[in-house]
Amino acid sequence: MNLLLEIKNKIVCDSKINDLVFNWKQNSEKIVFTNGCFDILHLGHISYLAQARNLGDKLIIGLNSDVSVKRLKGENRPINDEFARAMILASLVFVDTIIFFEEDTPELLIKKITPNILVKGGDYKVENIAGATHVMKNGGKVEIIPFVAGYSTTKIIEQSNSI
């Protein structure tokens, strides 16, 4: 298979995610879910996503759509459009699939997938994580992975604007 096509095939729609999740669960594979904007991929993201994938067998990333990023981060964001962000994430060997969501939080997507492990980064508290209650109620776990100090998309943008 062509590598570019293989990468692109990791970006899925609602109907395909249902099939993937069903098959993975049938094979007793542990599904890890995380989400974010991932606007400018940096070392902090790579470390976070690799650690998330180490918690299970399959890593699904819920990726904020461009419209969602704009609502959350402001009119000047995203820097990279959703297709570019998805392709970059999908090219990572430890990422199994990417699915977009339009809402401000991935709660509906998490309820659809019901992952074994829900992962968020940094300063989140379990009680403030969208979908955490649903995951735990269904026998799953919620994990918080610390930030890598000194790395953030906002910081990168601020530094580039000051040049």
Image: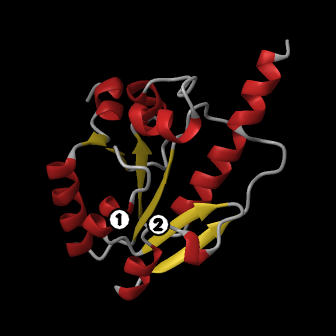
> Residue 160: x percent and y percent?
78, 18
Query: Position of 162 compared to 22: left or right?
Result: right
Badge 1 amino acid: Ile
Query: What colour scheme governs how the chains and residues are painted in the rendered image of this protein?
Result: secondary structure
Q: Where 105 sits versus 123, above or below?
A: above
Asked which secondary structure carries label 2, the reply is loop
Q: Residue at x 71, y 40 (%)?
A: 43
Q: Nearer the viewer, residue 35 or 117?
A: 35
Badge 2 amino acid: Ala
> Residue 73: x percent and y percent?
58, 37
Looking at the image, tell me whether mark 2 or mark 1 is earlier in sequence order: 1
Q: Where 2 sits versus 98, above or below?
A: above
Residue marked by disc 1: 110
> Residue 39: x percent and y percent?
56, 33
Q: Residue at x 57, y 52 (%)?
A: 49
Between circles 2 and 1, the one closer to the viewer is: 2
Asked which secondary structure carries label 1, the reply is helix
Q: CA distance from mark 2 to mark 1?
A: 8 Å
Q: How many marks?
A: 2
Quick check: marks 2 and 1 in contact, CB under 8 Å?
yes
Question: Which label number is shown at residue 63?
Answer: none
Quarter that holds the C terminus: top right
Q: Residue at x 57, y 32 (%)?
A: 74
Q: Nearer the viewer, residue 2 or 152?
A: 152
Label 2 neighbourhood size at 10 Å, few (<14), some (14-19), many (20+)? some
Q: Where 24 sits versus 9, above or below?
A: below
Query: Position of 80 compared to 47: left or right?
Result: left
Quarter that holds the N terminus: top left
Residue marked by disc 2: 130
Q: Residue at x 78, y 26 (%)?
A: 158
> Residue 4: x percent and y percent?
35, 24
